[in-house]
Image: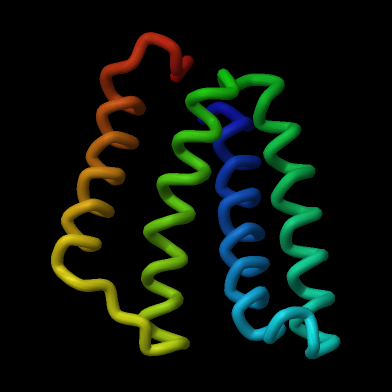
Amino acid sequence: MNIGFIYLSIAIVAEVIGTSALKASEEFSKLWPSIIVIAGYSIAFYFLSLVLKTVPVGVAYAIWSGVGIVLIAIVGALLFKQVPDTPAMIGMGLIITGVIVMNFFSKTISH
């Protein structure tokens, strides 16, 4: 496995943690969630920068944002009771399909 994709996984998880804490920070009015936001995004962008050494920027960003969107929707549903409606779930399914198509069929991704 390309080390870039391990770094990408770390970047995605850190971004999801940061975004979840962003909701909990209540407009940066709560200290600890605000610190988690800053740490999460710092880690996410650092690891995303490492990813770009081995994975094309368009591919890395598409996977990072696509998987992040779906994971944030899951976290939102579980932690904040913000359950997506059917059109939102269909849209996220299309995003996942796009990421799968890129990973299995695109020649721009080195496996």
Point out the residue furthest to the front here.
Answer: 27
Looking at the picture, the colour scheme in use is rainbow
Q: Which residue is drawn at 29% across and 80% down?
A: 83
In the image, residue 30 sits, relative to residue 104, either above or below, namely below
Total numbered circles: 0
Q: Position of residue 29 (x, y in %)?
A: 80, 88
Q: Residue at x 68, y 86 (%)?
A: 26
In the image, residue 22 sits, relative to residue 66, either above or below, namely below
Q: Where is residue 4 in the image (x, y as percent from the top left)?
A: 62, 31
Q: Which residue is drawn at 27% across and 73% down?
A: 84
Instruction: Classify residue 5 by image quadrant.
Output: top right
The C terminus: image quadrant = top left
Q: Position of residue 94 (x, y in %)?
A: 22, 44
Point out the residue furthest to the top here.
Answer: 107
Q: Position of residue 105 (x, y in %)?
A: 27, 18
Q: Is residue 27 left or right of residue 108?
A: right
Of 44 and 104, which appears nearest the observer? Answer: 44
Q: Which residue is drawn at 62% across and 58% down?
A: 15
Instruction: Classify residue 2 by image quadrant.
Output: top right
Q: Is residue 25 left or right of residue 57?
A: right
Of 76 and 1, which appears nearest the observer? Answer: 76
Of 66 and 2, which appears nearest the observer? Answer: 66
Q: In this view, does 41 lie to the left or right of 100?
A: right
Q: Is residue 67 left or right of residue 8?
A: left
In the image, residue 98 sits, relative to residue 32, either above or below, namely above
Of 75 and 28, which appears nearest the observer? Answer: 28
